Image (cartoon, helix red, strand yellow):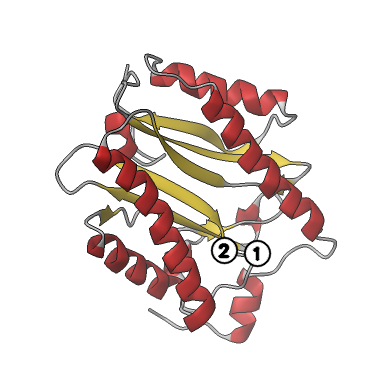
């Protein structure tokens, strides 16, 4: 991977002159609150389409009409799919099942982006998957803090960590910038493509894993802070 100069890195990681850290972290907090509110309304027997409507209406009720991508709720077999994939239609949440919520709302001009996985029953593998996706995220984030790895190296480490836990990492969900809306005005590339150590409070680490044989997975994302 081609190295970038200090000037190039500064250009990639720049923010507007009056950028407000307080507003940025408020957006992050509200995004996690929204995920919790959405999850509390999702129940066994519900169609995935219904859950996605709940996600949209909840965000509207909380005061945002804009997102840098639309909210996604994926049930069961669709948890192995990304937001770029076409989900299987008419998937219903079962008693022993798994689902994730991925939202990217804009609050007062600042982007939030978070994702989390939930389990509806007692299936041991699904419960472990939902726990391990967070575990991979935390180990990668700690590796970033301690060893100052590049974005590319972080995802190599994430892939290795997922494999050691018995899962496959989806490398097409590979992180990105976050900022005032839209972050693509500064940089549209992926975290996994960066050849420098990403700065704090600028990049989202996305982790999506799946079972090596069974049609389910888990997703977790948050800011590298």
Which quadrant of the structure image shows residue 106? top right
Q: Which mark is residue 201?
A: 1
Q: What is the total number of numbered labels drawn onto the structure image? A: 2
Which residue is identified by label 2?
Answer: 224
The answer to whether 116 is drawn above or below residue 41 in the figure is: below
Q: Residues within 10 Å of mark 1 (few under 14, many from 20)?
A: some
Determine whether the residue tagged by mark 1 lies in a helix, strand or loop: loop
Q: Residues within 10 Å of mark 2 (few under 14, many from 20)?
A: many
Give how far across and how far down residue 81 sits, in percent: 32, 39
The quadrant of the image that shows the C terminus is bottom right
Taking 97 as reference, is 150 left or right? right
The reply to whether discs 1 and 2 touch (Cβ–Cβ < 8 Å) is: yes
Rounded to the nearest angstrom, the CA distance separating label 1 from label 2 is: 6 Å
Residue in view at x 40 percent, y 21 percent: 48
Give how far across and how far down residue 36 sits, in percent: 58, 34
Choose the circle earlier in sequence order: 1 or 2: 1
The answer to whether 107 is drawn above or below residue 177 in the figure is: above
């Amino acid at each position: 991977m081609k190295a970038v100069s200090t000037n190039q890195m500064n250009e990639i990681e720049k923010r507007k002159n009056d950028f407000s850290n307080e507003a940025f972290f408020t957006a992050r907090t509200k995004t996690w609150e929204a995920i919790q509110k959405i999850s509390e309304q999702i129940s066994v027997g519900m169609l995935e389409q219904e859950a996605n409507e709940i996600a949209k209406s909840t965000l509207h009720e909380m005061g945002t009409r804009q997102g840098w991508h639309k909210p996604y709720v994926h049930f069961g077999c669709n948890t192995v799919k990304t937001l770029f994939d076409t989900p299987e239609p008419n998937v219903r949440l079962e008693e022993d099942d798994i689902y994730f919520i991925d939202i990217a709302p804009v609050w007062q001009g600042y982007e939030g982006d978070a994702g989390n996985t939930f389990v509806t029953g007692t299936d041991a593998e699904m419960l472990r998957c939902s726990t391990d996706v967070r575990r991979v995220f935390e180990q990668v984030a700690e590796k970033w803090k301690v060893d100052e790895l590049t974005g590319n190296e972080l995802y190599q480490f994430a892939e290795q960590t997922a494999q050691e836990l018995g899962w496959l990492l989806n490398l097409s969900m590979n992180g990105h910038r976050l900022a005032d809306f839209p972050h693509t005005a500064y940089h549209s590339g992926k975290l996994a493509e960066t050849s420098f150590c990403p700065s704090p409070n600028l990049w989202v680490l996305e982790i999506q894993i799946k079972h090596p044989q069974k049609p389910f997975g888990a997703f977790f994302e948050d800011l590298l802070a």
